[in-house]
Image: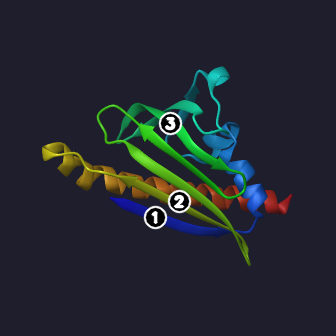
Amino acid sequence: MRIEVTHTFDVSVAEAFAYITDTKNWPEYWPGFIRIEKVTAARWSTAGDKVTVAIKLLNRERALNMELESFRKDACVTYVSRQRGLPDVRHERHFEAARDGCRYRRIVEYEPRRGFAGLFDRMLVRPSVEQGLRKTVQSLYRIFKIKERR
């Protein structure tokens, strides 16, 4: 399954990339974000870096283990997230210059599991991911508008 959302923000690519990839900002825009586990060990700037976050997903607190695959400054971030009881998910975050600022494209891909679990993945996980993507864009739009006024 592949879910893709693109939005353009009225900020530069460098500003959007720096803000979105800074783990200190995640609580401000990430829907359902609770905390970063082991904050002092959390790294997010080089392939192989890992961060575990606690999030509320499908009405439950879950540990989301994320491993960075690539981190190309001001261009693209890819990572895999793993959580117990759900399929592994591959994420891409693309940042591109646009006439109006920064075009931010988010791609989420996962392979539904077999059997009943796969039905769950198709019927409940997908809408939850789509809702999270929409809420993230809404939060970022609000945050970047506030920054613009300063």
Residue nearest the observer in this picture, 47 or 51: 47
Q: CA distance from mark 3 to mark 1?
A: 19 Å
Position of residue 46 measured from the top left corner of the image (x, y, whole percent): 65, 38
| Mark 2 Cα-neighbour bin, 10 Å: few <14, some 14–19, many ≥20 | many
| Residue highlighted by disc 3 | 66
Disc 1 packing (10 Å; few <14; some 14–19; many ≥20): few
Q: Which mark is residue 4?
A: 1
Q: Residues within 10 Å of mark 3 (few under 14, many from 20)?
A: many
- Identify residue type, mark 2: Arg
Question: Is 30 placed left or right of 3 in the picture?
Answer: right
Gap in Å between the C-alphas at discs 3 and 2?
16 Å
Measure how far apart labels 2 and 1 are at the Cα level. 6 Å
Q: Secondary structure at mark 3?
A: strand
Tag 2 near tag 1, CB within 8 Å: yes
Near-viewer residue (90 or 148): 90
Of pointers 3 and 1, the one earlier in the residue sequence: 1
Q: Which of 104/45 is in front? A: 45
Snapshot quadrant of residue 38: top right
Q: In the rendering, at what x and y percent does residue 51 appear?
A: 56, 31
